[in-house]
Image: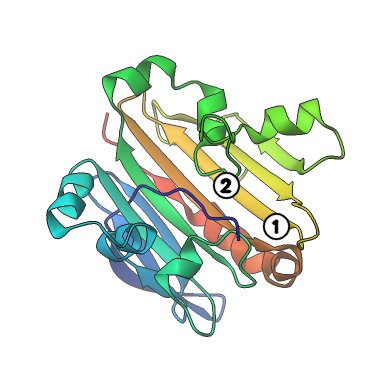
Amino acid sequence: MVRWGIAALVAAGLSLTACGTDYHYVSNRDSGAYFKVPDHWEVYGTDELLQSEDQWLTDDEVDDRTASVWLRGFDAADEPSPEHVLDATATSPRGYAEVRALSASERDSFDYAELRRAGFPLHDPTTGEALDPLEIAASDPGGIVTVLAYDDDDPLGPLELGEGLRGVRIRSRIAVDDEEPVILEQISVVDADTTRHYSFTVGCTRRCWDENEDVIGQIADSWTLKVQT
């Protein structure tokens, strides 16, 4: 199982009906970030997701982490769970949205490569740091990672970025050993001062992606940032 590393987004829901499908919006109003998911998909909050990643966290430790990080995860499985949100090899669509304050040291080195690493599930076995999918694909064509689409312009495809924001949108195919390949889409953005990082990640196995590509695309395109400058 490939697990996504996560931080977080605190959200509140609004309801919406579009094209005959029922959706609800998940939003972080303080940061101006929101997206939509189908009504029947399960949505999880910060505490549930942090504790599913580390069951030994105390309530005080969770409070400390949520002081600078906010999260909402979503899961389309018939039997959803917070653990599914972290499983990049899941057979139903799932993912998460994140808003995170950057430390002074992170701001100094948060370039486009770092934006691409954010949310990518493969890590360097020596350092434990997430790898850059674009770099992996370029160094080993036809290998574990294939970049299917990449955009670092404003807007990112159909996705409009607010003033002062810069980011990347990348879709990768990840094939590890004999497991079914995974399709992963990442949207990773920072504000003008590089003080806050916003990201949206959605993915599942290749067959799952093919069967749900339209709804996954609608959800990814709905990720909206209206940051006050």
Q: What residue is drawn where x is 61% and y is 50%?
A: 185
Task: Please say whether residue 104 is visible from this viewpoint.
Answer: yes
Numbered disc 2: secondary structure: loop
- Look at the picture and state if 117 lies above or below 58: above
- For the residue pair 217 and 78, the one nearer the viewer reads as 78
Which residue in the rendered view is the most extreme toward the bottom?
78
- Pointer 2: residues within 10 angstroms few (<14), some, or many (20+)? many
Question: Colour scheme used in the picture?
Answer: rainbow
- Look at the picture and state if 18 lies above or below 145: below
Which residue in the rendered view is the most extreme toward the front?
126
Q: What residue is drawn where x is 28% and y is 59%?
A: 46
Amino acid type for the residue under numbered disc 1: Val
| Mark drawn on residue 182 | 1
- Pointer 1: residues within 10 angstroms few (<14), some, or many (20+)? many
Task: Please say whether residue 159 is visible from this viewpoint.
Answer: no
Circles 1 and 2: CB atoms closer than 8 Å = yes
Amino acid type for the residue under numbered disc 2: Pro
| Mark drawn on residue 121 | 2
